[in-house]
Amino acid sequence: MESADAAEGFVVGARCCFDGYYATIRFVGEVPPAKGVWVGVEWDDASRGKHSGDHEGTQYFTCSKPGSGSFVRPRKVTLGYSFIEALRKRYAETSAETTERGGGGGGGGGKGEEDMFVISRNSLVTPVEMVGADMIKKKTSQLTKLGSVSTSLRGMLVSSVGPPGEISTVAPNIQELDMSTNHLLSSWETLAGICSQLTHLHSLNLSENFALSVPGDPRTLTPAFRQVKELTMNKMQLSWSQVCVVVSMFPGLERFHCCENLISEISSQPPLQSLRLITLEENQLSSWDSVFHLAPLPSLEILILNDNQIPQIFSPETDGRSPGFLELKSLSICRNRLHDWSSIIALDSMPALRELKIKGNPLFEGESGLNSRELVIAQLPRLQGLNGSPVSVVAMTTSHTHYLRVKPRLSPPCLGAAARVCLCVLESACSEESL
């Protein structure tokens, strides 16, 4: 029989793990006629459930998905670890286990030995050497001495902050933190408690944390994330409205990665003027009008939209809108549904555009790789790079010459303003040579 003490620390709404499967706690208490305390959970994987929170005619909790509930004993449930507990498990205990297997002194190799290194932001590998299990405390203390440390707690079941001030004492130098796939992390307040102690933190990865719900009052959490410059939130099932709430907590954010989410429409400009890079690969965007909500961002230099469903790019002049993307230097829009050359011409309205990646669109079907490259270069004479390859002066001249030969069959047979100037010069030169 499970006593009440066995359920200490179990709170309704908290996340938990049972036999490698994740769930949310919906109930803690007795379930007569069974003796002792039970934990009612709603499984992330609904197929694990046995009921919808009811037992013998009594409803103890409800499930968002019918049939996804179960009752389990507290002793079999894991509530996760505090940040420093997870850090020690990741970097200290692994090294001790490696030493016990003989991997710490004789070059035995294997995964455990790899875990004894920490990679810095400059890609330098810092070894953390262990002599034996008695050195775990020393090993942990070394975490405070690592300089520009990049720390991965991916999948380490972090669920709480820990004692006040512990993080800033044990690991104050963390600059890059990977907290992805921590399925027990459900609270932005918990994240704020962690990040507020990492004053040097500039890069944070929260990908695949599906249980991390949008906070009710994000303004109260802003001070904890003020130092973060780069945020990654891939595979989190986010909508654009949720994205805007989240980024509002990061006032200094410059680089934002939000791939493989549920973004089908960009309905408003994100509330940040500092964004320099936005990655929205593998979402469900299907309209350039939607993307154009990003156009007023004054600092945006790099926009990555690969693997969406955008059929056409429009110039703002076509419907009287103000010019946008004035500082955009690089655009990646590979594997979308661009189908005519007007989309290429529209890019001429971006005065700073120097790098374009656009392969894998229907527009280029039926054209050889060389021909399509030359046609794009001819219409965007300011380009310095196309699909990852540099654009030379010779290539630019050759491309314009090729365009003069094929422009009658293009649809539409027109150019952007900058390209027209280049072609006028080239046509004039060709005319003089033919006299």
Image: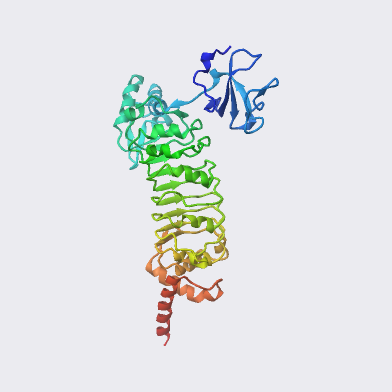
- Residue lying farthest right? 57
Is residue 352 left or right of 20 when viewed as pictured?
left
Q: Is residue 349 above or below residue 230?
A: below
Measuring from the top left, give residue 280's x and y in whole percent: 49, 50
- How many tags in the picture? 0
The reply to whether residue 404 is in sight is yes
Q: Position of residue 410 (x, y in %)?
A: 55, 72
Residue 297, above or below 421:
above
The answer to which quarter of the image holds residue 377 is: bottom left
Residue drawn where x is 49% and y is 45% of the image: 243
Depth check, front residue: 38 or 360: 38
Left or right? Give the position of 19 relative to 393.
Answer: right
Instruction: Name the image quarter holding residue 327.
Output: bottom left
Instruction: Give 179 or 251, whichever is nearer the viewer.
Output: 251
Q: Name the residue: 55% across, 25% down.
A: 18
Rendered-image quadrant of the N terminus:
top right
Would you say residue 205 is visible in this rendering? no
Compare residues 36 and 401 and report the one nearer the observer: 36
Residue 24 point in image, percent of width and height: 56, 28
Measured along the vertical axis of the image, is residue 121 above or below residue 70?
Answer: below
Image position of 234 with respect to 139: above or below: below
Query: Which color scheme does this rendered protein use?
Result: rainbow
Q: Where is residue 117 shown, x and y percent of the image?
A: 36, 33
Q: Is residue 38 left or right of residue 181?
A: right
Horizontal relation, residue 43 to residue 347: left or right: right
Q: Residue furthest bottom?
A: 435
Viewport quadrant of the C terminus: bottom left
